[in-house]
Amino acid sequence: MATCIWRTQLRWAECDPAGIIYHAHLFDWFSEGRIQWLKEHDLDYYKVLRPRGVELLVRHAEAQFFHAMHPGDWVALSVDLTSLTPTRAKFDYHVVKDDNIQQEMSRGITEHVFVHEGRASRVDRRTPDLFTLFQAAFSRS
């Protein structure tokens, strides 16, 4: 699998009143990391997929939290495409403190359905060249 690393610093605006990351913001990070993964694999969401009518709609998302993250913490989010079919894609995410790669802060997954012009679709039939790019990225180790 071809891993993408997306880095960010936790902002106060992403925290709850206790000063730790508000859980919903982790899903925003997953989205940012996934957008970066697509871009790094010649599948830029805004320049390649959307202009051709292809969307990746979330059908399932989950996250687990292991350690608190606080404002100012630098974190690295690794993103991997871990499952691919002509109709679905699954991404795995791991968040680690950027200064301590051994400490996993959180992890999660998102499962997506390929949609073409608003309808669930087989991407291999509608846009075979895009599916070939997804397959190439998925097969990299």
Image (cartoon, rainbow, N blue to C red):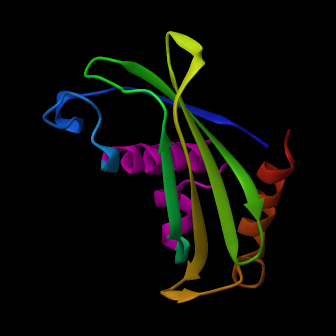
Residue 126 is situated, as x and y percent measured from the top left of the image, at 70, 84
User: Is 95 situated above or below 113?
Assistant: above
Give coordinates of residue 4: x percent, y percent.
Answer: 63, 36
Residue 16: x and y in percent read: 18, 38
Q: In the image, 137: left or right of 24?
A: right
Decide whether residue 30 is among the magenta residues. Answer: yes
Residue placed farthest to the bottom in the image?
Answer: 119
In the image: residue 54, left or right of residue 3: left
Image quadrant assignment for residue 125: bottom right
Residue at the far top in the pictured view: 99
Residue 108 appears at what percent x and percent y? Answer: 55, 48
Of 93 and 87, nearer the camera is 93
| Image quarter of residue 52 | bottom right
**Is 108 contained in the magenta span?**
no
Residue in the image at 29% along x and 23% along y: 70
The residue positioned 49% from the left and 49% from the top of the image is 63
Magenta residues, start to end: 25-51
Quadrant of the image for the N terminus?
top right
